[in-house]
Amino acid sequence: MRLTILGGGGFRVPLVYGALLRDRAEGRVTAVVLHDVDAGRLSAVRRVLAEQAAGVPDAPEVTATTDLDEALRGADFVFSAIRVGGLQGRADDERIALAEGVLGQETVGAGGIAYGLRTVPVAVDIARRVARLAPNAWVINFTNPAGLVTEAMSRYLGDRVIGICDSPVGLGRRIARVLGVDPDRAWIDYAGLNHLGWVRGLRVDGRDELPRLLADPGLLASFEEGRLFGAEWLRSLGAVPNEYLHYYYFGRETVRAHQEAEHTRGAFLRDQQARFYEELREPDADALAVWDRTRAEREATYMAENRDSAGAGERDAEDLTGGGYENVALALMRAVARDERTTLILNVRNRSTLAVLDADAVVEVPCLVDANGAHPVAVDPLPGHAAGLVCAVKAVEREVLAAAESGSRATAVKAFALHPLVDSVGVARRLVDGYTAVHPGLAYLK
Ligand code: G6P
Ligand code: MN
């Protein structure tokens, strides 16, 4: 089986390759094709993969190319993990938004819109090429903002594109852990959009265990989201939100914390990764050790400003080992390729799952996965305030898709202005001016 990874020179590719190396079952991936626009990054990542594969019998063969069409031909699966504009683009997104007093995070608020506006045209081009060159391939989209980008691609690939994120699984596992239940036996009642969802229940043997968690301040203080949102607010909600909802429920505090931080996440990762790729140009660098040290530092500092502003302290040791992102991708690929039925929380077209959205809206919900793809399962309706947020953000995503299709600057302004975390049309206009001035990828907006 052949897997093509777009963004193949990306920092997280060794996580995926490590998961492939652990997979010994029949029908596993035997060939990996890395595609990237930057040959230097490809060779750095290939060095890490070669060290990972050393001593592993039948390790998947790795090839690399900068030719997209060549990479896509013959693919059974395509992982899309690209970053249009690079980490400098992410840092610019954050800086310009924070200067206007709004959030610049790559998936939430103004930053997510800016990143979406320049990523959607590239993702659509990829989707069209896949439809032409590898029509039977399954595309697993990791590219953020993952829900929006998956929806853009689904217009060309239908249900053959599935979006993934590790935060719902991570949240479900953390809740199971503190409740002392086996996560593999628990049904996680999670629903929403990517980075905008809520766990409303966790059922084991037909019994909902979430009320036991919400009633226990000690248990609530013992995991990341409990500390981030606080026991009282979680009890008021009667649910546990995805960590990215911290940007909504504590909007002012998070904007302030990010404004006061020494550097934004994008600027930190830009510099950290520049050092990583630089170090790997050294012929006798220990590539795997350098990568792993860099990865550990990235994990430890994840959402640090949010945790600081909430007084939530350091991340738990169990949350630092990774194992989320690549395992979701591998579990999905296995279920589809080998018809190993499983349930995963994925980004797929809604059909009639969330009654407040139309059938083609990409949502993040539990899905039954088999050789025919990912089938969303029925969930309880979202409560009013969650339904309101989901509808508002989906409306923004639709404006982003419309702006990317038409090239209309006015539509781009509308996308920013309608976002619940952007509080003025004037701000929206200045954001579009600021973003189009720095991003070549937004030159299409007229
Ligand atoms: C989580 C999110 C992903 C994000 C990743 C890395 O897993 O769900 O969407 O890409 O963290 O975040 P970072 O800030 O390190 O790039
Ligand atoms: Mn994510």
Image (spheres, rainbow, N blue to C red):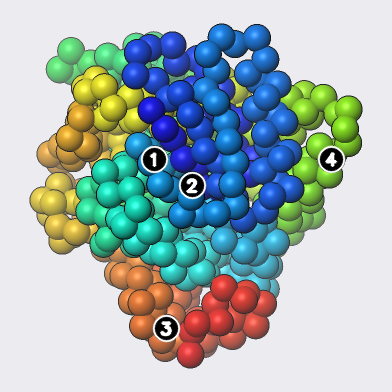
Check the picture and name the quadrant holding the N terminus. Answer: top left
Relative depth, front residue between 14 and 306 = 14
Image: 65 above or below 29: below
The residue drawn where x is 70% and y is 21% is 51
Q: Position of residue 28 (x, y in %)?
A: 39, 20
Q: CA distance from mark 3 to mark 1?
A: 31 Å
CA neighbours of label 4 inside 10 A, class few (<14), some (14 to 19), many (20+): some
Which residue is label 4 attached to?
Answer: 281
Q: Earlier in the sequence, mark 4 or mark 1?
A: 1
Which residue is label 2 attached to?
Answer: 71
Q: Secondary structure at mark 3?
A: loop
Q: Position of residue 233 (x, y in %)?
A: 41, 43
Q: Earlier in the sequence, mark 3 or mark 4?
A: 4
**Residue flagged by tag 2: what amino acid is it?**
Ala
Q: Relative to residue 316, is residue 355 drawn left or right?
A: left
Which residue is label 3 attached to?
Answer: 407
Which residue is label 1 attached to?
Answer: 75
The answer to whether the residues at label 3 and label 2 have Cβ atoms under 8 Å apart is no
The answer to whether the residues at label 2 and label 4 have Cβ atoms under 8 Å apart is no
Image: 356 above or below 24: below
The answer to whether the residues at label 3 and label 4 have Cβ atoms under 8 Å apart is no
- Observer able to see residue 313: no
The answer to whether the residues at label 4 and label 1 have Cβ atoms under 8 Å apart is no
Q: Position of residue 440 (x, y in %)?
A: 62, 76
Q: Earlier in the sequence, mark 3 or mark 1?
A: 1
Label 1 within 8 A of ligand 1 by Cβ: no
Q: CA distance from mark 3 to mark 2?
A: 29 Å
The residue drawn where x is 59% and y is 85% is 433
